[in-house]
Amino acid sequence: MAAITMAEMWTTVGSTMASFMFVWTIIRQYCPYEVRQHLEKSMHRLMSFFNPHIHVSIDEFMGTRLNRSEAYAAVEAYLSTNSEKNAKRLKLEMEKDSKKIVLTMDEYQKLTDEFQGAEISWVLRTKSPKPMRNGNNSQPETRYYNLTFHKRYREMIAESYLEHVMKKGKEIRVKNRQRKLYTNGARDKYAWPRQPMWSDVPFEHPARFESVAMEAEKKQEIIEDLLTFSQSKDFYARIGRAWKRGYLLYGPPGTGKSTMIAAMANLLNYDVYDLELTAVENNTELKKLLIEITGKSIIVIEDIDCSLDLTGHRKKKKKTEKETEDKNEEEEEKKQTDLKNREGERFSKVTLSGLLNFIDGLWSACGGERIIVFTTNHVEKLDPALIRRGRMDKHIELSYCSFEGFKVLAKNYLLVEAHPLFDMIQQLMGETEITPADVAEALMRKSPREDVEKSLSKLIQALEEAKKEAAAKKAEEESRGKAPAKDDSLLQDKKETEEPQSLDDGAVLL
Ligand SMILES: Nc1ncnc2c1ncn2[C@@H]1O[C@H](COP(=O)(O)OP(=O)(O)OP(=O)(O)O)[C@@H](O)[C@H]1O
Ligand SMILES: [Mg+2]
């Protein structure tokens, strides 16, 4: 008897639900949008009166459809790890600028999360946009995440959980994003519509610190320095300094300066902005470029000594030299006008002070978390003001290959850690200088038949040649040294008339 009553009850519930759904479908179809909205709102109000749960919605777009909400993207990333493990209906997505495919929860899939003892549930829903006045509904549905939790956790969710979701979500997005290599050199300034200040390509350099030939201790010190910097947001805020750090990489060509920059970017997961100073017209343009640079980036100025004449040295003003100086200035002016007029000639007015402002003036703090790297083959040519600590905080010399450096390359290129020929290589390396680039070239396999022994022999040959060359050069220098040094006095005079100039240098002509 009871079973029959139960069955009857379910039939009644079922038919009531069916009637309700039927009526609701008719309402949805035939009721004007405003009435429907009104009914929905009233229903929500009625339900929330009895419901102990709080709902928070996070829309995909803010204001216009063009702005995808940062919060939505962060939630999506945060939930992606949870979805991969727990959701049954997933969607595969590959976001613009992301190097990884992401599995996100599908619409109406529910996911639960736990935080400080609270159970939180997330659902991805869609909502139809408001129809236009003419009744057309051309806009697609928009998505939003709905977050539900019990009202007793209200404060905790608002104060800690949402912050936790945003932080974790942003971290995941940074990890998954496709890093970029930007350059300012390839822009046509007169093109219309205007081209962006920086053009970019995906940054895919494979260099790693493990493969950089360098003494282990020195390498470790650089790695620690970089990691400490990237984790010191609070420290920099506390001491009142912009969150940035300058590195000066110097050494002969082929010693791994550019390779190290790529390794730095890969270690920290930063973008790289390769700033071509010769393509920057003036300080204002430099400032504009700087504003566009986002955080988590390495700004690189390669061969700073060649980029601009930024040494800041100028002739001493002696009274007796006044006339010559005037004449020189006239000539210089003429030279500049000639250059300006020459078709296609670039005229850069980037000054040393402009560059210094770029590095550590008021403008340097915008964007946050950035590393500035200068590379040069001639550190002695640079103005001390440019590379003093605080601007270029860490000076790293990359020099000729040491035996320890060679062992890194041998392990990397030949997969060997020891070999009978190593002793001979060590001895030769103590007698002559060879760049890591030359060692790498010798160790590079040129045919499938080349084995370890052959590669090491090629290196020994390269070392012997380098030794011979160095001996020949030394002999030539010695023979020149014996000849009367006719230019020495002149050189001395020149040195005396030069002195470091203050930073208010004028325009520099390229
Ligand atoms: N320290 C190193 N460790 C590993 N490989 C190196 C190292 N130095 C040079 N190489 C190899 O030599 C090549 C040239 O090196 P890289 O371009 O980094 O030199 P560089 O110091 O930037 O030279 P330049 O001053 O001419 O710009 C790289 O492709 C790399 O394979
Ligand atoms: Mg280089």
Image (cartoon, helix red, strand yellow):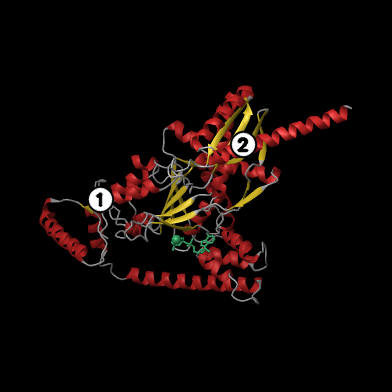
Up-down: is 447 above or below 340?
Answer: below
Up-down: is 262 above or below 287?
Answer: below
Of residues 37 and 429, the one drawn nearer to the viewer in this rendering: 37
The residue at label 2 has a CB less than 8 Å from ligand 1: no
Q: Residue furthest right?
A: 1
The label on residue 63 is none
Disc 1 on helix, strand or loop? strand
Up-down: is 443 above or below 230?
Answer: below
Residue 504 % position (x, y): 24, 46
Report the Cα–Cα distance between label 2 and label 1.
88 Å
Residue 56 % position (x, y): 56, 32
The label on residue 499 is 1
Residue 234 % position (x, y): 49, 34
Considering the image in quadrants, where does the N terminus appear? top right
Of residues 297 and 305, the one drawn nearer to the viewer in this rendering: 297
The label on residue 24 is 2
Q: Residue at x 38, y 69 (%)?
A: 478
Give the side of residue 170 with respect to residue 320, left or right. right
Of residues 308 and 171, the one drawn nearer to the viewer in this rendering: 171
Q: Nearer the viewer, mark 2 or mark 1?
A: 2
